[in-house]
């Protein structure tokens, strides 16, 4: 079975300019594109040091020897590999979609974003893994690895993911801490309506994981286009509310914007890079906030 | 031309319009559940919105119209032709139409043969048995209320039935000369002047001879009522022929009645005579051929057959089932014996169908109503289907489906 392709062609074309990078160096072993404070073999210059017996002769900077008549060894920063964990919220609220595009649910969009991130990681030969959390447990876990086979495995698991249930209690997530090593890059895709999801992100950030949060919002939550009486139902709790949408619109938009501001300030306080992304926007826009050429300077300035 | 309703009460079905209206007002968007995860930031704002709101005027209109049309169809609207009327002429098939001025030329255009299907008299004369009464009633019932009818009949009308014809309208009853060369069926064979009865008796049945003689005498006395008295005919004189011809010879005439009361085989000449159309009553002891058809013609009070009949060629063979002595057959001594015996021989009389035309002019006052209106069901049905198509189109067109989703 061919791995499903969640990335639209035009989005795939725009992924070219993106590049995964971690704010903190991981310090792990191995070679990679990412800078490390550990010195070693590599391209980025770090320092010269005096030759010691045992150093490889090809590491000696012969031009400097010509100038100073002493052997100096050129040391470069060691490039460290990066581990990208993509965590998808697959609770029932992620199944919500806009009426204009019923198939494009929050979960489908999250799949697309995850596939884009996987594509970036694969291009840079990073390790990556996928975790799906929903229905009261960790529903999907693909251990981190690299390579095209790993990508296909992740895409298949993403394909299997269904939006159901609620975000689990904290105890159910303890096993994840063994997987998510410190310094790992964690991309969390959720609507962050559930406070426990936010707490989970805050804990990850506090425990030295670099957390990137993308809040997925439907267009109806941004615009609230409903007119007249409607029966609104919360897919997770099953609570229902009959209200006159036109009258409730202003209050809702105000309360919702307030909630997003509060969420943004919590993320910023926890040092979490975050952005909001509405389903009718191009998928690469959210990733561009994190991995674009201008880097992550404007992080926390989510709209 | 006006519209009338056969069942005005069916218009009550229009009340059913309330159903789509009720559904329409009830099926409002608040009945559609919207998944909305950000529910906690949403507050209930219930305006007192009991004001009925019509979302899709055209769809509702079409549905109400559909129900109204169906109710109208149930009410059976009819177009009543109040003023227009036509003149019709019916011509008996026994008539010579050349001799009737009214049937020739333009006035004959509305003339039809009094025959099944009522072909125009421009068509050849249909050669069917006349069935005047029934056809008259049928044609009359198919006419409009104000239509006029003229019927041409010969002096002797054939094809009448037991009921005097009663029609819905006064009609012009015209008597015209009949076609001369027609085999009119008018001439029925006159009953014979003398009915001969051929009695062949052997020694065993000698004692029963007195009963036959007594019956014959009773017939000739003409005071004995017969089962099927021939209409308008004289009662024939009955003659007994006994021992005048040889025993095994056939009777002289096919119309003779044969009483063969001898034991043993039926002689070949007798059997041939029966097969040629004769009627014979044989004794119980006579051996007759078996037949698939065997009918009990006469039963006693207990229901046991006294005489059985079977066909033989074109004739009939009757056989006593009892010995011809009063101990076995008490009916021999019964006062009704002569008439019952005669009924065995006499053929069934044809029902009289002929009558003098002047005396059977149809009366007015038939039971039923004249067909005075035309139904418009077809047009109404077509309209209903058109409205249904529009309703379906409105209900399923894509713009609406999208707005219903929102």
Image (cartoon, rainbow, N blue to C red):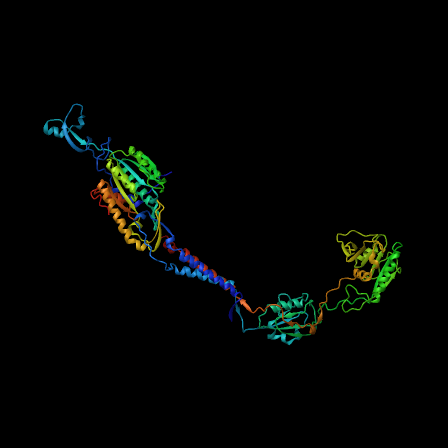
| Residue A118: x %, y % from top left | 29, 39
Q: Quadrant of the N terminus of chain A?
A: top left
Number of marks in the rendered image: 0
| Residue B299: x %, y % from top left | 78, 56
Side of A170 where B229 appears, left or right: right
Residue at x 42% of width, y 58% of height? B22
Determine which quarter of the picture holds residue B135: bottom right
Determine which quarter of the picture holds residue B107: bottom right
Determine which quarter of the picture holds residue A164: top left
Say above or below: B401 vs A149: below
| Residue A6: x %, y % from top left | 33, 42
Farthest top residue in view: A53
Farthest bottom residue in view: B101
Residue A116 can be seen, yes or no: no
Residue at x 22% of width, y 45% of height? A301
Say above or below: B40 vs B317: above
Residue B358 can be seen, yes or no: yes
Side of B263 where A212 appears, left or right: left
Q: Nearer the viewer, residue A242 or B258?
A: A242
Q: Nearer the viewer, residue B105 or B370?
A: B370
Q: Nearer the viewer, residue A282 or A149?
A: A282
| Residue B219: x %, y % from top left | 83, 64
Q: Nearer the viewer, residue B129 or A70?
A: B129
């Amino acid at each position: 079975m061919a791995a499903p392709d969640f990335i639209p062609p035009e989005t795939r074309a725009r992924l070219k300019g993106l590049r995964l990078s971690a704010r903190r160096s991981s310090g792990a072993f191995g070679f990679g594109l990412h800078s490390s404070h550990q010195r070693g073999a590599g391209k980025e210059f770090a320092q010269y040091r005096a030759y010691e017996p045992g150093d490889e002769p090809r590491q000696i900077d012969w031009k400097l020897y010509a100038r100073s008549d002493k052997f100096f060894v050129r040391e470069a920063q060691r490039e460290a590999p990066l581990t990208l964990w993509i965590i998808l919220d697959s609770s029932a609220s992620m199944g919500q979609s806009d009426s204009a595009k019923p198939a494009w649910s929050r979960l489908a969009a999250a799949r697309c974003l995850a596939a884009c991130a996987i594509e970036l990681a694969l291009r840079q030969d990073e390790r990556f893994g996928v975790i799906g959390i929903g229905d009261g447990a960790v529903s999907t876990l693909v251990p981190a690895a690299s390579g095209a086979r790993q990508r296909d495995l992740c895409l298949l698991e993403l394909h299997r993911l269904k939006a159901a249930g609620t975000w689990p209690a904290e105890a159910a997530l303890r096993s994840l801490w063994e997987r998510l090593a410190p310094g790992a890059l964690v991309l969390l895709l959720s609507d962050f309506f559930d406070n426990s999801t936010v707490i989970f992100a805050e804990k990850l950030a506090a425990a030295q994981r670099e957390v990137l949060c993308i809040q997925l919002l439907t267009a109806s939550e941004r615009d609230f286009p409903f007119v007249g009486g409607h029966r609104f139902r919360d897919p997770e709790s099953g609570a229902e509310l009959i209200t006159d949408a036109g009258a409730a619109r202003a209050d809702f938009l105000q309360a919702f914007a307030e909630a997003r501001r509060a969420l943004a300030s919590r993320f910023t306080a926890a040092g979490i890079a975050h952005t909001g992304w509405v389903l009718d926007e191009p998928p690469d826009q959210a990733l561009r906030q994190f991995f674009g050429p201008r880097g992550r300077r404007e992080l926390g300035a989510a709209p | 031309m006006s519209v009338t309703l056969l069942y005005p009460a069916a218009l009550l079905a229009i009340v059913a319009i309330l159903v789509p209206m009720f559904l329409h007002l009830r099926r409002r968007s608040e009945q559609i559940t919207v998944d909305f995860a950000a529910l906690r930031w949403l507050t209930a704002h219930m305006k007192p919105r009991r004001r009925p709101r019509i979302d899709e005027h055209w769809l509702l209109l079409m549905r109400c119209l559909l129900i109204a049309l169906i109710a109208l169809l149930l009410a059976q609207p009819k177009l009543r032709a109040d003023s227009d009327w036509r003149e019709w002429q019916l011509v008996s098939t026994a008539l010579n139409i050349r001799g009737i001025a009214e049937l020739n030329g333009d006035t004959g255009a509305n003339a039809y043969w009094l025959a099944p299907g009522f072909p125009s008299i421009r068509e050849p004369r249909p050669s069917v048995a006349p069935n005047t009464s029934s056809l008259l009633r049928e044609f009359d019932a198919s006419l409009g209320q104000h239509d006029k009818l003229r019927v041409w009949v010969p002096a002797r009308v054939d094809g009448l039935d037991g009921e005097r014809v009663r029609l819905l309208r006064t009609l012009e009853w015209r008597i015209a000369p009949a076609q001369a060369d027609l085999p009119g069926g008018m001439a029925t064979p006159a009953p014979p002047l003398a009915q001969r009865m051929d009695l062949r008796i052997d020694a065993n049945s000698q004692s029963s001879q007195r009963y036959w003689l007594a019956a014959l005498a009773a017939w000739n006395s003409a005071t004995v009522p017969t089962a099927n008295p021939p209409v308008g005919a004289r009662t024939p004189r009955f003659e007994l022929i006994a021992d005048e011809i040889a025993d095994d010879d056939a009777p002289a005439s096919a119309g003779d009645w044969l009483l063969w009361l001898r034991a043993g085989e039926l002689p070949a000449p007798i059997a041939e005579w029966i097969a040629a159309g004769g009627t014979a009553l044989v004794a119980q002891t006579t051996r007759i051929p078996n037949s698939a058809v065997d009918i009990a013609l006469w039963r006693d009070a207990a229901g046991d057959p006294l005489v059985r009949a079977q066909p033989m060629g074109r004739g009939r063979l009757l056989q006593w089932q009892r010995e011809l002595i009063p101990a076995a057959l008490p009916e021999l001594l019964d006062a009704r014996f002569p008439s019952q015996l005669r009924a065995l021989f006499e053929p069934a009389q044809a029902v009289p169908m002929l009558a003098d035309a002047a005396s059977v002019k149809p009366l007015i006052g038939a039971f039923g109503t004249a067909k005075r209106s035309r139904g418009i069901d077809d047009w109404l049905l077509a309209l209903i289907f058109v409205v249904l198509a529009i309703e379906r189109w409105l209900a399923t067109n894509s713009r609406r489906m999208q707005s219903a989703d929102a």
